[in-house]
Image: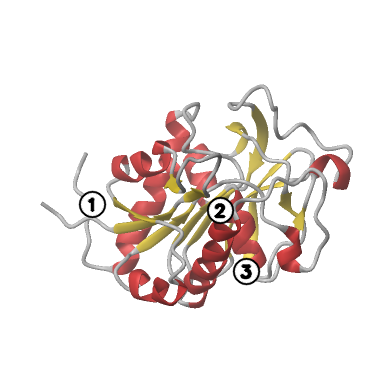
C-alpha cells in the first residue's frame, strides 16, 4: 500500500463550564474529508506547550487550519466589536503560534474560515470585523437560523478552486460575519462573492502551497465538488513532499 501524507488539524476548545470539564473537539467533516481524499488526519489539541509545536510539525506533511469562533481583534491592536464572539483564548494563543510556525517553514496549508483569516493576519493582512457594518451593501454571509446557508461566488479559472468548480458562478456554504479586508502580499484572490468579499485565496508563488477558503467545504451540506478541494490539497501535499503516492480509490 502506498504511503499517505500526514495532515495535521487543529482543534476547537471549550474551558471548564458550569461544572463540566474542559475539552477539545473537531467537526468530523474535517478529518473525514482528509481520509476520503487519501490522507491521514493527525489532530493537535490546543496545548499550552507552545515550544513543542515545531517538533510536531516536523512529523507532518501538511496542515489544515480549521474554522471556528471569532479571532479577538485586541490581539492585533483593534477594539473588541460588539458582534464578536471570540474563540477561547487558549485556542487562539495556540493557533497563532501554530500558524506562525506553518508560515515560517512554508508548510503546505489549507485554511478554512477563521483559519484563512488567521493565515492572512500572520502574513500581514487584516480583517473586516463585521461585514454588515464594514461593507453595508454586502450580501448575507451568515444566517443564524440556517447553519447551511449558501451564497454564490465567482472563481478565477487559473486557480485550485477554478480547477475544482470550473469557471463562473458557484454556490457554497457560508456562515461568517468577519472577512479579509487587506489581503497579505503573499496571497492572491481566487474567488469573491459578487459583493466583493474575498472567499478564496492562494499563494502568489510556487514556494508555498496555500489553499484558503472562507466557505466550508467540510460542511454536511457540502457538494461533491466541495469535497474535491480536499482532494486537490492532499494530492498537492503528496507531490510536494516527494515519494508519496496516493492509492487509487
Camera-side mark, 3 or 2: 3
- Dot 2 or dot 1: first in sequence order is 2
Observer-nearest of 123 and 57: 57
Q: Relative to 15, is 73 above or below?
A: below
Q: Is residue 91 above or below residue 178?
A: below
- Residue in the foreground of this view, choosing between 164 and 101: 101
Name the residue rendered at 36%, 44% in the picture.
31
Q: Residues within 10 Å of mark 1 (few under 14, many from 20)?
A: some
Per the model, the C-alpha gap separating discs 3 and 2 is: 13 Å
Residue under the point 67% across and 22% down:
145
Quadrant where the C terminus sits is: top left
Apparent side of residue 237 relative to residue 66 in the rendered image (left or right): left
Q: Residue furthest left?
A: 1
Measure the alpha-carbon separation of dots 3 and 1: 31 Å
Where does label 1 land, which residue? 246
How far, Cα to Cα, is label 2 from label 1?
A: 22 Å
Asked which secondary structure carries label 1, the reply is: loop
* Discs 2, 1 touching: Cβ within 8 Å: no
Q: Nearer the viewer, mark 2 or mark 1?
A: 2
Q: Which mark is residue 212?
A: 2
The residue at the point 59 percent across, 53 percent down is: 88
Residue 175, position as x, y percentages in the image: 64, 35
Residue 233 x/y as whole percent:
41, 52
**Which residue position holds label 3?**
122
Amino acid at each position: 500500500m502506498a504511503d499517505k501524507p500526514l495532515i495535521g488539524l487543529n482543534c476547537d476548545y471549550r474551558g471548564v463550564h458550569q461544572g463540566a470539564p474542559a475539552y477539545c473537539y473537531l467537526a468530523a467533516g474535517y478529518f473525514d474529508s482528509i481520509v476520503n481524499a487519501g490522507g491521514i488526519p493527525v489532530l493537535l489539541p490546543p496545548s499550552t506547550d507552545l515550544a513543542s509545536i515545531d517538533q510536531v510539525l516536523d512529523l507532518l506533511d501538511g496542515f489544515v487550519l480549521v474554522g471556528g469562533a471569532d479571532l479577538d481583534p485586541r490581539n492585533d491592536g483593534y477594539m473588541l466589536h460588539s458582534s464578536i464572539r471570540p474563540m477561547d483564548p487558549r485556542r487562539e494563543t495556540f493557533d497563532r503560534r501554530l500558524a506562525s510556525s506553518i508560515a515560517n517553514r512554508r508548510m503546505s496549508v489549507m485554511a478554512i474560515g477563521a483559519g484563512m483569516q488567521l493565515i492572512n493576519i500572520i502574513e500581514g493582512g487584516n480583517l473586516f470585523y463585521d461585514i454588515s457594518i464594514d461593507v453595508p451593501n454586502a450580501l448575507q454571509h451568515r444566517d443564524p437560523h440556517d447553519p447551511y446557508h449558501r451564497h454564490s461566488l465567482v472563481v478565477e479559472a487559473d486557480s485550485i478552486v477554478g480547477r475544482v468548480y470550473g469557471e463562473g458562478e458557484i454556490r457554497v456554504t457560508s456562515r461568517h460575519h468577519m472577512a479579509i479586508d487587506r489581503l497579505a502580499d503573499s496571497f492572491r484572490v481566487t474567488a469573491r462573492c459578487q459583493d466583493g468579499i474575498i472567499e478564496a485565496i492562494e499563494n502568489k508563488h510556487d514556494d508555498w502551497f496555500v489553499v484558503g477558503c472562507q466557505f466550508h467545504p467540510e460542511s454536511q451540506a457540502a457538494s461533491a465538488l466541495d469535497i474535491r478541494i480536499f482532494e486537490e490539497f492532499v494530492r498537492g501535499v503528496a507531490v510536494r513532499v516527494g515519494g508519496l503516492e496516493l492509492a487509487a480509490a
